[in-house]
Image (cartoon, helix red, strand yellow):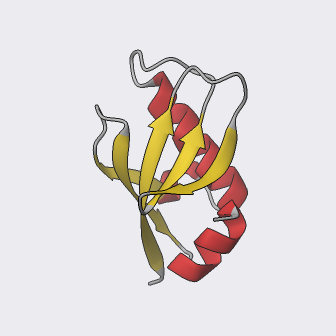
C-alpha cells in the first residue's frame, strides 16, 4: 500500500487557507480555523485530502495533534506524488 508521511507546520487563524511552501523541512500550511476543539486540525485534514485527491479518512495526524508541528500520513499516494499535489 502506498502512503506518505510529511512534516507540517500549521498556522491557524490565517486570513485564507493555503499551502505556502516549505520552511525548515516542514510544509507550511495556513488555515482559517482557530486551534480550538480540533477545528484547525480538521481544516488541515480537509485541505490536504482535497489537494491530494483522496478521501479525508485517508489523512491522519500521526503526531502533534496539539502542536503546530505535526506529522501527517496520507494513504493512497506516495511522497513525491503528495508533494507535487501540495505544490511543495
Q: Is residue 51 above or below residue 9?
A: below
Residue depicted at 57% across the width and 49% down the height: 56
Tell me: 36 left or right of 11. left
Q: How many marks?
A: 0
**Residue 84, image x and y in percent?**
68, 73
Residue 18 percent across, percent down from the top left: 69, 41
Q: Toward the viewer: 32 or 45?
A: 32
For the N terminus, give its image quadrant. bottom left
Quarter of the view holding residue 43 = top right
Q: Does any portion of residue 17 appear in the rendered image?
A: yes
Question: What's the residue at 60%, 71% (across, down)?
Answer: 82
- Left or right, residue 44 beside residue 19: left
Report the residue at 58% width, 81% height from top.
80
- Residue 85 percent location from the top left of the image: 70, 67
Q: Is residue 78 visible?
A: no
Q: Nearer the viewer, residue 38 or 12?
A: 12
Q: Is residue 25 left or right of residue 80?
A: left
Residue at the spot 57% in from the left edge and 44% down from the top edge: 29
In this rendered view, identify the residue nearer to me: 22 or 53: 22
Q: Which residue ends up furthest to the front in the rendered image?
A: 24
Q: Quadrant of the C terminus?
A: bottom right
Relative image position of residue 24 (x, y in whole percent): 42, 58
Above or below, 12 against 74 in this view is: above
Amino acid at each position: 500500500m502506498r502512503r506518505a508521511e510529511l512534516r507540517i507546520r500549521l498556522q491557524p487563524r490565517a486570513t485564507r487557507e493555503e499551502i505556502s511552501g516549505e520552511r525548515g523541512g516542514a510544509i507550511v500550511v495556513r488555515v482559517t480555523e482557530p486551534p480550538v476543539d480540533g477545528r484547525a486540525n480538521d481544516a488541515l485534514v480537509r485541505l490536504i485530502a482535497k489537494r491530494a485527491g483522496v478521501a479525508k479518512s485517508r489523512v491522519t495526524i500521526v503526531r502533534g495533534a496539539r502542536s503546530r508541528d505535526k506529522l501527517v500520513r496520507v494513504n493512497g499516494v506516495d511522497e513525491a506524488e503528495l508533494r507535487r499535489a501540495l505544490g511543495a
